[in-house]
Amino acid sequence: MTKAPGRLVKFWRTLGPGLITGAADDDPSGITTYSLAGAQFGPSLLWMAVASWPLMWAVQVMCARIGMVTGRGLMSAMRERFPRPVLFGVCIALFSANSINIGADLAGMADAAELLSGVNSHVWVVVFGVGILWAAVALRYAVVARVLKWLALVLGAYVLTALLSSPDWGAVLHDTVVPSLPSDAEGWGMIVAILGTTISPYLFFWQSSQEVEEEKGLGRARPQRIGATAEELKARNTDVGVGTFVSNAAMFFIMLTTAITLHAGGNTHPKTSQDVARALEPLAGRGSMLLYTVGIFGLGALAIPTLAGSSAYAFAELLGFRQGIDAKFGQARGFYIIMIISVLGGVGMDFLNIDAVRALYLTAVLNGLVAPPLLIGIAIIAADKTLMRGQQSTRLALGLVILTAAIMVAAGVAMFAI
């Protein structure tokens, strides 16, 4: 007789798109932004990790619900309510921001690889870019999803890094529960960047599209994918809750680590991920440096397919291409070509000697400014009784998403006005 799986195994099996999307949020761009926040502002912004969690959860649950109920991705649903030229502009903006992000993510991974191996970072950029592209094109969705799910465990490296740094937990608790608002444009710019890399547009499109991929994986045709049971929605709420919690916990520990090492040591403006890793070694030990770099490798490998895939899903859904990581190249040629161009553009960016840390930070700020109108569009779709087949989002969820958009707008205004 086959032994029934234990509770932990059952729980792990319920996790999927929500966990993957949450972990992908802590890509090298996120790691860099959080590292800069800790290095420049010390522990004063730790409260952001707590305050942004329910906001991120509400947004990602809503995107998941749209995919599960309509049986199609977010851009496909938006086609029903918004002008195509506007959506085409959204796709261009998403593709541009994602490609820059991919380039900067590859540079961050390559810098970390050079630190450990001594091999020039340009070589590693090509190796990582080609390797990730091959996996995304050659492997089927079930395999890719399984690999990405296990890569999410890499986030634990940042918890260990912070613990190795021996923080003052009393002071940490104070900065976590007592918000400290910035008094200058630089501080507000960092808040916009944190919000932009945490509640990022590419995650909206990836989350909803992965719900469709999950349905395809179960062998369900389009008519069978419409609608979702209460049990399915509850399971995804848990999945997204865990994914966003893990993501924000990693944010917290990354900021904490750099606050009590780099900021305390006067290194407030690191230029590369190598700078951060090298600074950690004498202050917190070689173990911390190694964990930091391992995290960059794992999360870059998780995030880059997510970034390229979200652009490809958005364009394919708008233009009516066949899409999906489960399709072979010849069956979804346009979808894969968009992914390839996005990643190769990122590889090429590295050879232009662009400041990777600056590019990552500016991408986070750009995402923070672009996200609010998209959030309003998502709320409109999620509240549409006809489009959502009578399973529209609750008023509480809609209120949280609109509040998220308002907070991001307010932070953006403060960044320019103060």
Image (tube, grey):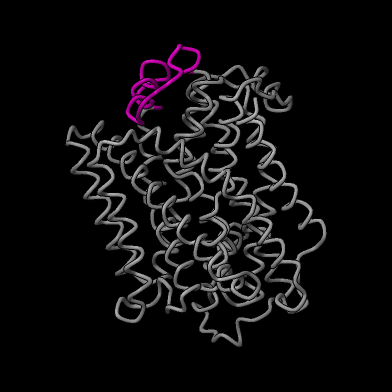
Which residue is located at x 58 percent, y 52 percent? 243
Up the image or down, 312 lies above or below 29; here it is below
Q: Picture coordinates of residue 362 (x, y %)?
A: 46, 37
The total number of labels drawn is 0
Q: Picture coordinates of residue 195 (x, y %)?
A: 60, 40
Q: Quadrant of residue 279?
A: top left
Who is closer to the viewer here, 347 or 254?
347
Q: Picture coordinates of residue 306 (x, y %)?
A: 44, 57
Q: Quadrant of residue 411?
A: top right
Up the image or down, 374 lies above or below 83; here it is above
Who is closer to the viewer here, 228 or 199?
199
Q: Is 280 included in the stretch rendered in magenta?
A: yes
Up the image or down, 33 lies above or below 382; here it is above
In the image, taking residue 41 as reference, residue 273 lies left or right, namely: left
Looking at the rendering, in which quadrant would you find the N terminus? bottom right
Who is closer to the viewer here, 1 or 149?
149
Magenta stretch, main secondary structure, is helix
Q: Is 15 included in the stretch rendered in magenta?
A: no
Looking at the rendering, in which quadrant would you find the C terminus? top right
Q: Which residues are magenta?
A: 261-288
Which residue is located at x 54 percent, y 87 percent? 221
Which residue is located at x 49 percent, y 34 percent? 33
In the image, taking residue 180 as reference, residue 259 lies left or right, namely: left
Who is closer to the viewer here, 90 or 290?
90
Q: Picture coordinates of residue 184 (x, y %)?
A: 62, 21
In the image, taking residue 342 as reference, residue 324 lies left or right, namely: right
Which residue is located at x 63 percent, y 60 percent? 7
